[in-house]
């Protein structure tokens, strides 16, 4: 969440030109809790492990779950 200062690194595959960051039906490694905004920073990593510069923070609100 924005302001929590918790950092998690995860390698995400690009599939059909998209990166999935959600969980469950949305796919991806992260399960978002609550309606508070989150921030993500992305960087490309090549096969040798070389990382490009990170993007600026992208702030988003997780989708609402419907049961």
Image (cartoon, rainbow, N blue to C red):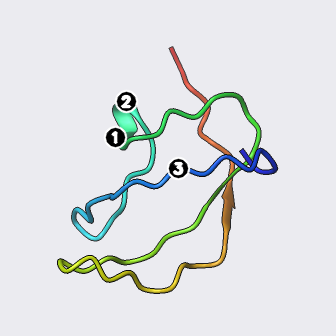
- Numbered circle sitting on residue 8: 3
Q: Looking at the image, which residue is at 77% across and 44% down? A: 4
Q: Residue 46, located in which quarter of the rendered image?
A: bottom left
Using a 10 Å C-alpha cutoff, classify the residue at mark 2 as few (fewer than 14 neighbours), some (14 to 19) or many (20 or more): few
Numbered mark located on residue 24 in the image: 2
> Dot 3: within a 10 Å radius of its alpha carbon, few (fewer than 14), some, or many (20 or more) residues?
few
In-front residue for pair 45/57: 45
Instruction: Look at the picture and state if 19 lies above or below 63.
Output: below
What secondary structure is marked by label 1?
loop
- Which label sits in the foreground, 2 or 3? 3
**Which residue is situated farthest in the right direction here?**
3
Vertical position of residue 57 compared to residue 40: above or below: below
- Mark sitting earlier along the chain (2/3): 3
Query: In the picture shown, does residue 8 fall above or below 48?
Result: above
Left or right of 40? Residue 51 is: left
* Residue linked to disc 1: 27
Q: Give left or right: position of 30 versus 14.
A: right
Numbered disc 3: secondary structure: loop
Q: Give how far apart the Cα atoms at labels 2 and 1 are.
A: 5 Å
Q: Residues within 10 Å of mark 1 (few under 14, many from 20)?
A: few
Quarter of the image for residue 62 reads: top right
- In this rendering, would 9 be left or right of 46? right
Distance (Cα) linking label 2 and label 3:
18 Å
Q: Compared with residue 65, is residue 18 higher up or lower down, i.e. above or below?
A: below
Label 2 secondary element: helix
Please tell me which residue is depicted at 57% across the width and 67% down the height of the picture. Answer: 41
Residue situated in front as seen by the camera: 61 or 9: 9
């Amino acid at each position: 969440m924005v302001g929590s200062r918790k950092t998690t690194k995860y390698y995400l595959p690009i599939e059909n030109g998209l990166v999935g960051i959600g969980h469950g039906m949305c796919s991806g490694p992260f399960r978002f809790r609550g309606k508070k905004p989150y921030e993500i920073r992305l960087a490309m990593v090549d096969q040798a492990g070389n990382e490009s510069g990170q993007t600026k923070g992208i702030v988003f609100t997780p989708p609402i779950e419907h049961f």
